[in-house]
Amino acid sequence: MYNNQTEPETPPTFGERNRILIKGLLVGFLILLMLVPGILVSDLVKERQQRQADVVQEVSSKWAGPQTISGPILMLPYKEYGKTTDGKMTEAIKMAYILPDEVHIDGDMQAKEKKRSLYSVMLYQSGLKLSGRFGTLPLAALQIAPESVMWQDARLLMGIGDVRGISDQVQLEWNGNKQLLDERITDHGMFAEGFSAPVTVNAQTPIAFSINLSLRGSGNLYFTPTAKTTDVTISANWNAPAFDGHYLPSDSEITGKSFKAHWKVLPYARPYPQYWKNGVQNLSSGSFGVRLIQPVDGYAKTNRSVKYAILFIALTFTFFFFLEILQKRQVHPLQYILVGIALTIFYALLLSISEYTGFNIAYLIASTATISLIGMYAWSMFKSGKTAIGFTFALSALYGYIFILIQSEDYALLFGSIGLFVIIAIIMYYSRKIDWYGITRHSSYDSALTQSPIQQPTGLTN
């Protein structure tokens, strides 16, 4: 009969020694898997944005679209003579275009929001007064003989972005004489739509003019600098303007309920000349003006928040992973997936609620509901009120941090990089004492191998 001896512990398997590593890889795979519903939510946000754009287009088509004022421009027909190869004289009618020396525009915009279903469209009604003067005609520079000019066919042209926005007759005062600028022109080349009127000119006399224009539109009101000196002053009862185009205003003032902006544009940087003949110029390439924007764009902010979905899911799963290790409680992969789905549904809640309440209130409601749900679920998993409260506080801080990033667009990169650095520092601090390889758990096995070798049997007894 053998003597009683202490048998050594069974050597740990690969799975036992690398249990934390395997679980970490599984959690990483689940994080990547949860990107799929995040992509679906992002597509939903884009779909709703497109629906909003369709509504804006529909309302604008019934009111008037964005407006661009081009001109006025003096169009001067002239005859050009030549000879054929057999010596016969030919005659062709050509066009010369002359821009004014000065244009001053004073305008007032009355902005209004038009509601259609869940969406708002920015519309405006404007009153514009254009005044200025043409100098002596540069016929010598254009190489046009005065006797070849068809003076009786001279016309004044003005481009309008959408002529449906004209809400009253366009009054023209030309060198003291009043008339209507009412003959519509389409697809002129320099502008798609506009008006014209016959005018009286001569080669040596400067001409003063003024135009009163009542114009409505949606979103944008732009101007093209068609003079040697273009001076524009615009005021509006709206506090969220965006100054766009080729030039920024030389000065602007924005108050709580209105704004006022002033541009002064000189011809040096203008991408077209002061006069030309036998062709058209792309006047819109030098346009500038103002765009009325809605200060809170829920879809844009929701779309930005969706971009942080991977950060939400990764950090939340990391919190659960560390709690699982520190609390020595197993969390099933299905529980990770349920938490990930709850985090994804947050964005669907945010999107749907923001269409009725605005982004900020929707974010508060959706985040509170999500934090409460996951916090209670953490309590049921770890059976510890202290752990659940700590996890809820950490998740609340994360949602608050992301909200600050979304609101602070100009400083999002700075705050984001600092915040992520702090988060990774906290994770590294609390993970420094974790027994990642499970060495402590198997110390008794190592001790058995080094301190208690198996004794060989010494003999048999009767």
Image (cartoon, rainbow, N blue to C red):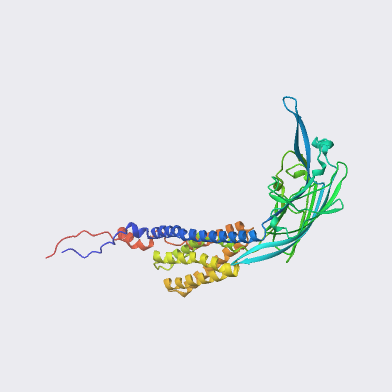
Q: Quadrant of residue 220?
A: bottom right
Q: Nearer the viewer, residue 87 or 318?
A: 87
Q: Is residue 142 above or below residue 416?
A: above
Q: Identify the residue shown where x is 43% and y is 68%.
A: 327
The answer to whether 362 appears left or right of 81 in the picture is left
Quarter of the rendering occupied by the N terminus? bottom left
Q: Identify the residue shown where x is 67% and y is 65%.
A: 113
For the image, the number of numbered tags is 0
Q: Residue 399: give x, y in percent of width and height.
A: 55, 66
Residue located farthest toward the bottom when viewing the structure as drawn: 385
Q: Is residue 442 above or below residue 286?
A: below
Q: Residue 37: give x, y in percent of width and height.
A: 46, 61
Res 188 visible? yes
The answer to whether 302 appears left or right of 338 in the picture is right
Q: Nearer the viewer, residue 369 or 186?
A: 186
Residue located farthest toward the left when viewing the structure as drawn: 462
Q: Quadrant of residue 381?
A: bottom left
Res 253 visible? no
The answer to whether 320 appears left or right of 255 in the picture is left
Quarter of the rendering occupied by the C terminus? bottom left
Q: Identify the residue shown where x is 52% and y is 59%.
A: 42
The answer to whether 409 appears left or right of 174 in the picture is left
Residue located farthest toward the top when viewing the structure as drawn: 86
Q: Identify the residue shown where x is 32% and y is 61%.
A: 445
Q: Residue 428: give x, y in percent of width and height.
A: 50, 60
Q: Residue 166: give x, y in percent of width and height.
A: 72, 58
